[in-house]
Amino acid sequence: MMDKKRLEIDEIKAYSLEVLCAIRDVCEAHGINYSLTGGTLIGAVRHKGFIPWDDDIDVMMPRPDYDRFIRLVTEEEGVPFRLLCAERCGEAYPYPFAKACHPDTVLIERRMQTPGAELGVYVDIFPVDGVGDTMSAAVRRCKRFQFWHGLKVCKNWTTYRTSKLRKWYYEPFRYGCYLLSKLFTRRFIDRKLDRFARKKPFATTAYAGRLVGDFGSKEIAPRALFETTHTVEFEGQAFRAIVDHDTFLTNLYGDYMTPPPAEKQVTHHEFDAYRRE
């Protein structure tokens, strides 16, 4: 049951920040390595908080820490968020990464099906996987993973829509993936993705990356980049972030310190969020 009034962006930010603080507390209590990532990391570096027009929070963890985090949260009592992931929700869960949801909210995504997993205002938690001992091998593995990841995403679209992030010439490929995804079961795709992600152990490979990220081979960096963190400020709170954030963010976004033009200062999320009664 939910209020009829949708949450405003500032309310969504407040709820997601509460979840981030809870994730931080679990990680600090158990020695789990984590880092802010993506637009959240840009926000910390450029604004010391949220990017003004965005409302999401992203965190990444090396795969061994990610797996331990999932186990700990599953086993612990009284964790102040609901953790959704394939390990807990089964093959119907549409994402190859976890979402920590605020329990006092309900969130409805407009273009994705989430059977068996009721969303709330969330923080995305991405695993960082080993991808190869040379850059060329890492890029090849990343491309194969991205293909199957794309099929998983398409498998859960309620309908085909053009991308707000990709250029127009990607659309034929995206539509082809949408049609191709209908030929495979979710279970088959999930097994493919899990084998790809775990084949190169994070601790012993030279290169690593967020295979489930949006930037393909740009996500790849020497493993050490993801292992060393320091404290940064975000919305008046202290969190961990990779020390060499400049290399990581430049690979992904180019000149990340210069805000985009006004017409591009919009969130890319497509959801409606509500407060539970």
Image (cartoon, grey):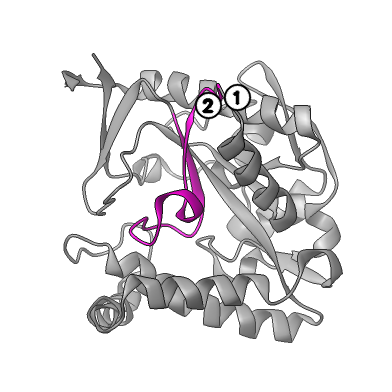
Residue 169 in percent (x, y) is at 33, 78
Disc 2 on helix, strand or loop?
Answer: helix
Asked if residue 54 shows in the view, the reply is: no
Instruction: Residue at 45%, 79% (x, y): give it.
Output: 147
The residue nearer to you, when weighing 101 against 77, is 77
Q: Quadrant of residue 47?
A: top right
What numbered label is drawn on residue 22? 1
- Left or right, 266 with reference to 149: left
Q: CA distance from mark 2 to mark 1?
A: 5 Å
- Of the 4 image quadrants, the one containing the C terminus is top left
Pointer 2 with pointer 1, Cβ within 8 A: yes
Q: Is residue 262 above or below residue 154?
A: above
> Within 10 angstroms of label 2, few (less than 14), some, or many (20 or more) residues?
many
- Up-down relation of residue 20 to residue 104 (above or below): below
Residue located 69% across and 24% down the image:
25
Say which mark, if any, is on residue 19: 2
**Visible in this render: residue 52?**
yes
How far from the left and from the top, in percent, is residue 153?
35, 65
| Residue type pointed to by label 1 | Ala
Lateral position of residue 180 relative to residue 87, left or right = left
Which residue is at a point 36% across and 20% down the rendered structure image? 104
Query: Which residue occupies the extreme left position in the image?
Result: 4
Region of the chain picked out in magenta, as a range = 78-101
* Residue 22 sits in quarter: top right
Q: Position of residue 65 (x, y in %)?
A: 73, 49
At label 1, counting other C-alpha atoms closer than 10 Å, the crowd grade (few under 14, some 14-19, many 20 or more) is some
Q: Nearer the viewer, residue 131 or 88?
A: 88
Q: Give the camera-side residue of 275 and 171.
A: 275
